[in-house]
Amino acid sequence: MRQIEIKLRSRAKINIGLDVTGVRDDGYHLVRMIMQSVDLCDDVTIRADREAVFCDKSGKDIRITCDRPGIPCDERNLAWKAASLLMDETGIGEPVTIDIVKRIPVAAGLAGGSGNAAAVLLGMNELFNLGLSGEDLCKIGLRIGADVPYCLTGKTMLAEGIGEVLTPLKDLPKCHILLAKPDMDVSTAHVYGELDRKKDLRHPDIDAILEAVEGSDLKRICAHMGNILEEVTEKEHGVITEIKKSMKKNGALNALMSGSGPTVFGIFEDIKKAEKAYDAIKKEDLAKQVFITAPI
Ligand code: ATP
């Protein structure tokens, strides 16, 4: 019997390094990013709903449900965009329902939406036996967002170009990762816009991080971690500095903002220290959404 449902984990990512090296003529930013997926995830369930008819205003039978209030469940949802693009590319017209259970904080710099879109591309490809290659899915994913190609595979990866030139790296050495998302949303477009206006930026040394990853040297990786977008988001939101300080005071090897923020992550060798830092952030009320997770 034909498979009618598939369930995928859509994992959050952090940026161990993030540099912006230029802007293309079409406005896209050129980046060099060291990406790492973590085991914090959303659940994405895709169902082929042959009986259903819920044709929306686009004329497509795509239904999204999400347990997190405030996330649009229409064509603004990145999971919807992924399903719609796959339908355009392959001509499948079967009604599809996508149920999203959210654990990843939203508008947080953790690629929550991009991960959901990647899960839909992978899931529908399998569910409907579309036979698209990884390269095909990357091309479609890039039309949704720069992080989507990376989210198709996850793990430790160098992302260059506008995010689509991917080079797999050695796994990160074993460690614990504390994530803390302060109570505000950050617009990625705003952060990149402000970055373009700034001069004399301090660029992180991505090559030094790459060498340290190659040598499986966690302390050196942590010593060189850097994110150029902190120059915008951290300056606008002092709580990011406070969270970084709190994590380091409680034993993090280092702490950094992920993506365009505002989530901060700390890297710990010792789980007890990560737990102590978790308690401190909660006690000081620096963030409500706090998670201890690990690279995966
Ligand atoms: P990235 O690191 O890829 O920029 P992010 O963590 O900064 O991602 P998202 O969690 O993807 O940001 O959310 C950004 C915006 O996208 C939010 O305003 C949200 O309403 C919208 N959005 C659309 N689809 C989704 C989805 N499936 N999950 C979460 N947010 C979504």
Image (cartoon, grey):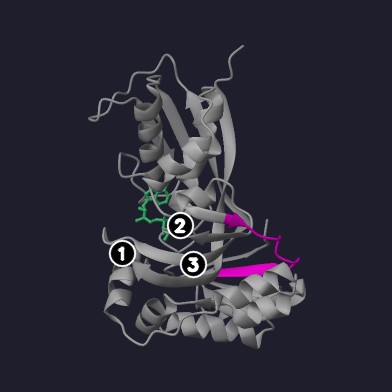
Q: Are marks 1 and 2 in contact (CB under 8 Å)?
A: no
Q: Residue at x 71, y 60 (%)?
A: 171
Left or right: 51 as drawn, with respect to 24: right
SS state under label 2: loop
Between 104 and 206, the one nearer to me in the picture? 206
| Mark drawn on residue 189 | 1
Task: Give the CA distance from mark 2 to mark 3.
Answer: 8 Å
The residue wearing badge 2 is 163
Q: Residues within 10 Å of mark 2 (few under 14, many from 20)?
A: many
Check mark 2 vs ligand 1: CB closer than 8 Å? yes or no. no
Q: Residue at x 67, y 84 (%)?
A: 250
Report whether residue 182 is seen: no
| Mark drawn on residue 32 | 3
Q: Which numbered disc flags the more N-terminal residue, 1 or 3? A: 3
| Mark drawn on residue 17 | none
Q: Position of residue 188 (x, y in %)?
A: 35, 64
Q: Residues within 10 Å of mark 1 (few under 14, many from 20)?
A: few
Q: Quadrant of the image for the N terminus?
A: top right
Q: Position of residue 199 (x, y in %)?
A: 32, 85
Q: Is residue 121 above or below residue 61?
A: below
Q: Is residue 191 above or below residue 96?
A: below
Task: Give the CA distance from mark 1 to mark 3.
Answer: 18 Å
Q: Amino acid at mark 2?
A: Gly
Q: Which numbered disc flags the more N-terminal residue, 1 or 2? A: 2
Left or right: 198 as drawn, with respect to 137: left
Please identify, in this view, whether the residue under mark 1 or under mark 2 is nearer the observer. 2
Q: Amino acid at mark 1?
A: Ala
